[in-house]
Image (spheres, grey):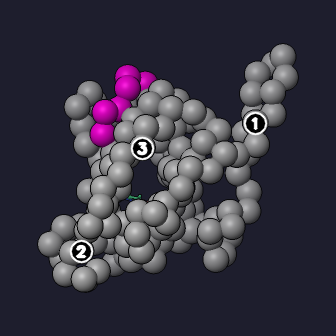
Amino acid sequence: MSIKDSKLITFPKIHDKRGNLTFIENIEHFQSKIARVYYIYDVPGGSVRGGHAHKENHEILISVAGSFDVVLGDGHQRKKYTLNRPYIGLYVPPLIWRELENFSSGSVCLVVASLVYDEKDYFRDYNEYLNEID
Ligand code: TYD
């Protein structure tokens, strides 16, 4: 996998005078249906989250409130995305290292995942990750 396989996805935005609504249903990059949703919130200023890669799990990261940066790496290249729109998701394939940083006050990171949580699906050690992908 390369960071070139990561991409921003624009979800539908239904606008009316009562406010906006965005929905996420079938995701073409997931081989199966959505398996899990989790969210990260109340992040203290200066905290860095992530610091791992998945072996098989695909994810989509969305800033449903506020903003934060996502730094992706594939062992060769790095790319930084700023997420600050509730209708834009960042697709992160397996085997891509990610770090989430620069969270604004009150920001919420919603993550849609293709697999249920399994600690065995994680590379949490960067050197182990590099050895595996090379
Ligand atoms: P962690 O992977 O460190 O969060 P981040 O992606 O922000 O770095 O997860 C924090 C803790 O939450 C860790 O003990 C694993 C647990 N966890 C679950 O139990 N289920 C989940 O779906 C997730 C994403 C994490």
Q: Does label 3 or label 1 sit earlier along the sequence?
A: 1
What's the residue type where badge 2 is placed? Tyr
User: Which image quarter is the N terminus in?
Assistant: bottom left
Q: Residues within 10 Å of mark 3 (few under 14, many from 20)?
A: some
Residue 15 visible within the image: yes
Q: CA distance from mark 3 to mark 1?
A: 21 Å
Q: Which residue is mark 1?
A: 13
| Beta carbon of the mark 2 residue lies under 8 A of ligand 1 | no
Is 112 placed above or below 41 here?
below
Disc 3 + disc 1, Cβ < 8 Å: no
What's the residue type where badge 1 is placed? Lys
User: SS for tag 2?
Assistant: helix
The magenta-colored residue range is 101-106
User: SS for tag 1?
Assistant: strand
The count of marks equals 3
Q: Which residue is mark 2?
A: 129
Q: Does label 2 or label 3 sit earlier along the sequence?
A: 3
Front one among 105 and 28:
28
Q: Does label 1 or label 2 sit earlier along the sequence?
A: 1
User: SS for tag 3?
Assistant: strand
Instruction: Please identify the residue farthest to the top as the structure is shown.
Output: 17
Quarter of image, ligand 1? bottom left
Q: CA distance from mark 1 to mark 2?
A: 37 Å
Q: Residue at x 53, y 71 (%)?
A: 115
Disc 2 + disc 3, Cβ < 8 Å: no
Q: Residue at x 37, y 72 (%)?
A: 95
User: Which image quarter is the C terminus in?
Assistant: bottom left
Q: Which residue is mark 3?
A: 81
Front one among 114 and 117:
114
